Image (spheres, grey):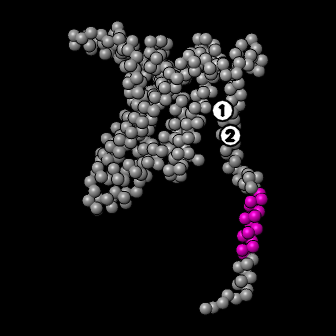
């Protein structure tokens, strides 16, 4: 076996020492070295950091309101400190439990049914052969996303209005009695979910459709050669390939599971107290607390609970997903 020349050994040793020095220098320089080296990229990131600083982090000082009995005649830090009294009142009155169940329940239904239907519709659209029909169907399904909640509330009111709504007019013509939908709280559980899906299904479907188009055709061609039919190709290729997209969207949705859909609930329900028991969520409660009673402390307590619950939930779910499959976790 040929032995390496002394000169070659010396060169290899020199290169090894140079690499070690580069690594050591990189470790010593750290963040500031990267900041100077990639200053253009950091400057591009600066507006986003300033935006979140102004709109997300500085307003967090208002958390102090949740522990005070706020008086509009005083400033923030001059308000009477009451500790956990606002939280205790929310819990003992049963309001917090009801609001939590409603908020989590509706959002869980939105996430579950929304993602399942979006995946089904995306797969069906992807399997369509007619290019023009596919584009028209995609546009029609995506169009409700641009309809404002104010317009949606007008549509819903004109359908279910007791006096001259479309539903009751149709029932009267068929010889049946009118139905007072606005006095039936249980009906709105299904109506709110239905109208949410109608409005947001197209947007979620586009995301999954983009993920499907990114799947290589080689998988489907190999499956065809093995004799797999269309349903087998969907179940064993398309659906598993969408798992990563589903998990990422699930984590994003869980981060705001306590936030609710304020525009949807407020525009459809308004100030109808009959429906509060089944349709009231944390966002609408906070809004009424500020609008009607001006109870800033109570509204802030509900908001702090809302944020803390969502934070713990997203951290827990992300930890579980990271343990199961590290590639699907957000961090």
Question: Is the residue 222 above or below the residue 310 in the image?
Answer: below
Which one is nearer the viewer's eye here, 152 or 103?
103
Res 311 visible: yes
Q: In this view, does 22 lie to the left or right of 244?
A: right
The quarter of the image holding the N terminus is bottom right
- Decide: few, some or many residues near mark 2? Use Cα within 10 Å; few <14, some 14-19, many ≥20: few
Residue 7 percent coordinates (x, y)? 73, 86
Instruction: Give the residue at x 76% y 14%.
Output: 74
Which one is nearer the viewer's eye here, 156 or 294?
294
Question: Is the residue 204 above or below the residue 16 in the image?
Answer: above
Question: From this viewpoint, which residue is outermost toward the bottom?
Answer: 1
Instruction: Give the residue at x 47% y 30%.
Output: 107
Question: From this viewpoint, which residue is outermost toward the front?
Answer: 92
18 within the magenta span: yes
Q: What stretch is highlighted in magenta?
A: 15-29
Q: Which picture quadrant has residue 85?
A: top right
Residue 56 - label: 1
Residue 15 percent coordinates (x, y)? 72, 75
């Amino acid at each position: 076996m040929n032995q390496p020349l002394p000169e070659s050994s010396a060169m290899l040793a020199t290169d090894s020492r140079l690499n070690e020095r580069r690594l050591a220098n990189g470790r010593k320089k750290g963040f500031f070295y990267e900041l100077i080296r990639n200053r253009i990229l950091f400057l591009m990131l600066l507006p986003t950091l300033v935006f979140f600083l102004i709109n997300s982090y500085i307003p967090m000082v208002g958390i102090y309101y949740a522990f005070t009995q706020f008086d509009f005649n005083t400033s923030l830090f001059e308000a009477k400190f009451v500790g956990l009294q606002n939280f205790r009142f929310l819990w003992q009155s049963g309001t917090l439990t009801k609001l939590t169940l409603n908020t989590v329940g509706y959002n869980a239904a939105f996430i579950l049914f929304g993602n399942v239907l979006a995946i089904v519709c995306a797969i069906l659209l992807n399997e369509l052969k007619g290019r023009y029909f596919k584009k028209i169907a995609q546009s029609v399904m995506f169009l409700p996303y641009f309809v404002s909640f104010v317009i949606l509330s007008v549509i819903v009111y004109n359908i279910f209005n007791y006096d001259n709504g479309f539903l009751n007019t149709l029932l009267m013509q068929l010889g049946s009695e009118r139905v007072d939908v606005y006095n039936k709280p249980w009906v709105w559980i299904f109506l709110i979910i239905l109208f949410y899906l109608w409005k947001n299904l197209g947007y979620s479907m586009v995301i999954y459709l983009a993920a499907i188009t990114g799947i290589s055709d080689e998988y489907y061609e190999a499956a065809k050669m093995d004799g797999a039919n269309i349903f087998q190709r969907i179940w064993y290729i398309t659906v598993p390939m969408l798992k990563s997209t589903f998990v990422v969207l699930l984590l994003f949705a869980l981060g705001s599971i306590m936030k609710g859909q304020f525009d949807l609930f407020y525009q459809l329900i308004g100030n109808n107290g009959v429906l509060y028991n089944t349709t009231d969520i944390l966002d609408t409660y906070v809004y009424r607390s500020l609008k009607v009673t001006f109870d800033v402390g109570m509204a802030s307590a509900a908001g702090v609970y809302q944020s803390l619950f969502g934070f713990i939930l997203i951290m827990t779910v992300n930890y579980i997903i990271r343990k199961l499959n590290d590639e699907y976790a957000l961090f």
